Image (cartoon, helix red, strand yellow):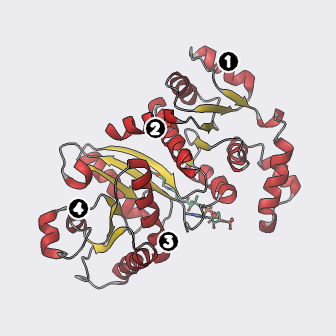
Amino acid sequence: MQFMQAIWKQARVEKRRIVLAEGEERRNLIAAGKIIENSLADLILIGNEENIRNNAKEIGVDIDGATIADPDKSDKLQQYIEEFYEIRKNKGMTLEKAEKIVRDPLYFGTMMVKMGDADGMVSGAIHTTGDLLRPGLQIVKTAPGTKVVSGFFAMMIPNCDYGEAGMLLFADCAVNPNPTAEELASIAITTAETCRTLCNTEPRVAMLSFSTMGSASNELVDKVRLAAEIAKKQRPDLDIDGELQLDAAIDREVAALKAPNSPVAGKANVLVFPDLQAGNIGYKLVHRFAKASAIGPICQGFAKPINDLSRGCSPEDIVNVVAVTAVQAQKCN
Ligand code: ACO
């Protein structure tokens, strides 16, 4: 798990304030203990203080190093309600509705990040992906120049020479069900940036399809080809190419036959899937059949980092997602 070791090391360099919005929940509390013990972040636990302390005591976790924020008792509540109303008033938000919504831990935590009272947020052990993403998309929004938020997995494949000695980034596997060519181009560029900033590796991005460089003709292929053109035009400094079939993207011998002039083919370390069905199925195939570690989905493209957990997550998963969020927050500054 070289990727996570590097992330842990980096997270400790300059600690960031990370919100755990499900602060009363057992796995979050166990994770909080480990995060504090390992100095990975300065934690803010959202919830009722008495419940948080009682639950932590019951499971024998020391959370003394964490800050507790109870939305109902917070002296920031009124400011957050007014600011949330300002952000959403042109979408039909009223002060009365804002008053109720901002008390929700996910909205309160997102407002903390928006207002600079925290550097990032992690949630999703008991909420759905949509529950977490919606406040993020409405309040924090995308980073400047980024069209969409998306989700990537860092795949670590044992006994494999593809990518960077078996490590590749897969995107979008979590957010955009059917991206347009412009959105797909944005996902490719954002994932390339992620490869640089989180993996310290120069990206080689393959835009995947069932066709390689015009071998098939179909509107689905046209979308991927156009996305590759847009991405290359927007960021000529990045190695992005497509459309490529998976084998041409990762295997040098196939690449030599199918795409001999591509700067990416045969050595891609970032795979961009044409839609969410392909991305989600793709990462699960590699995870299951190749027994690969799949770290994620990690959200990318937010102006400030907000990350989702699987509802089946373990405390260790939460620790790792918090560490990644802390490193993303360092790179935001
Ligand atoms: N990037 C940036 N902004 C976005 C994005 C995006 N990808 N998607 C929506 N938005 C914006 C909209 O423009 C809108 O902005 P506005 O209200 O200021 O005008 C706001 O977010 C809300 O958009 P809606 O379309 O109303 O929100 P919706 O209810 O459709 O939810 C969501 C968006 C949650 C991302 C939805 O597309 C979704 O559920 N995606 C799939 C998530 C999923 O199930 N993933 C699989 C999980 S399994 C796994 O991760 C391994």
Residue at the spot of label 4 = 267
Question: Does residue 206 appear in this view?
Answer: yes
First in sequence: mark 2 or mark 4? 2
Q: Which mark is residue 54?
A: 1
First in sequence: mark 1 or mark 4? 1
Point 43% across, 34% down: residue: 9
Of badges 1 and 3, the one in the foreground is: 3
SS type, badge 3: helix
- Relative side of 214 to 311, left or right: left
Circles 4 and 3: CB atoms closer than 8 Å: no
**In whole angstroms, how far apart are the C-alphas of marks 2 and 1?**
32 Å
SS type, badge 1: helix
Of badges 2 and 1, the one in the foreground is: 2
Q: Which of 11 and 120 is in front in this view?
A: 11
Circles 2 and 1: CB atoms closer than 8 Å: no
Q: Which of 186 and 71 is in front in this view?
A: 186
**In whole angstroms, how far apart are the C-alphas of marks 1 and 3?**
46 Å
Of badges 1 and 4, the one in the foreground is: 4
For the residue marked with disc 3, what is the amino acid? Glu
For the residue marked with disc 2, what is the amino acid? Gln
Residue at the spot of label 3 = 183
Question: Does residue 172 appear in this view?
Answer: no
- Relative side of 324 to 271, left or right: right
For the residue marked with disc 4, what is the amino acid? Lys
Q: Position of residue 285 (x, y in %)?
A: 29, 53
Q: Residue 271 carries which label?
A: none
Find residue 2 and report its image quarter: top left
Q: Residue 10 carries which label?
A: 2
Q: In this view, does 106 lie above or below 55?
A: below
First in sequence: mark 2 or mark 1? 2
State yes or no: Cβ of the residue under disc 3 lies below 8 Å from any atom of ligand 1.
yes
